[in-house]
Amino acid sequence: MPLDQWEFTITEGNDVLRRWNWRSFRDLSADTFTVDLHCVTRWSKLGTHWEGVSLDTIFADIKTDADYALVHSYGDYTTNLPLEDLMNKQAWIAFRFDDEDLAPEHGGPARLLVPHLYLWKSAKWVRGITLMHEDKPGFWETLGYHNYGDPWREQRYWGD
Ligand SMILES: Nc1nc2c(c(=O)[nH]1)N[C@H]1C(S)=C(S)[C@@H](COP(=O)(O)O)O[C@H]1N2
Ligand SMILES: [Mo]
């Protein structure tokens, strides 16, 4: 994804609520943070170090009464989660990992990072978020992975 074509867009219904290009996105204030990641296939990676823009910053001047988010990636991957799981410094659009620009195979130039949920919720190559009043399962959720995906409750598949 060439940076001069990169965009990140928040939509609701037919409305574009906000859109950033790489320059305006990188002008947002960013956080550095260290988190543990949990994959559904039973590995965890502890103490990973990142830099990214929190979703609190992304949503700072967006007004919505939607409760759900569907996150879209370049290349059509999607994943869903409650909007409140993106807020209160629980989620970031991350663009640096271990003090280097995020590698393309790990989602560069930028990926969602939601460390408190299983890693399939952390969409690589993130492109935007659709806000919704009703939940809508994403790619893995449609294929049988758990709709919410709390690693502490081992919510791997529907019914867990
Ligand atoms: N766009 C996109 N994001 C994605 C995926 C994917 O296939 N496409 N896979 C998910 C899954 S299942 C996992 S485990 C993590 C893997 O991230 P990593 O490649 O940085 O380890 O990305 C998640 N985000
Ligand atoms: Mo995964």
Image (cartoon, helix red, strand yellow):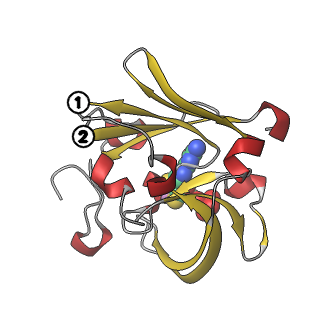
Q: Which label's residue is closer to the chain start, 1 or 2? A: 2
Work out whether 105 lies above or below 129: below
Q: Amino acid at mark 2?
A: Asp
Residue 2 image point, x, y percent: 84, 37
Q: Residue at x 42, y 66 (%)?
A: 89
- The residue nearer to you, when weighing 1 against 58, is 58
Disc 2 packing (10 Å; few <14; some 14–19; many ≥20): some
Quadrant position of residue 22: top right
Work out whether 142 lies above or below 99: above
Q: Residue at x 64, y 72 (%)?
A: 50
Work out whether 143 lies above or below 95: above
- The residue nearer to you, when weighing 65 against 120, is 65
Residue 98 image point, x, y percent: 73, 77
Q: Which residue is mark 1?
A: 133
Q: Which residue is mark 2?
A: 67
Looking at the rendered image, the quarter that the N terminus falls into is top right
Disc 1 packing (10 Å; few <14; some 14–19; many ≥20): some
Q: CA distance from mark 1 to mark 2?
A: 6 Å
Quadrant position of residue 100: bottom right
Residue 67 image point, x, y percent: 24, 40
Circle 1 — which element?
A: loop
Q: Residue at x 29, y 32 (%)?
A: 136
Please report contact status of discs 1 and 2: CB closer than 8 Å, yes or no. yes
> Farthest residue in the left direction?
159
Residue 145 seen in render: no
Q: Amino acid at mark 1?
A: His
Circle 2 — which element?
A: loop
- The residue nearer to you, when weighing 159 against 75, is 75
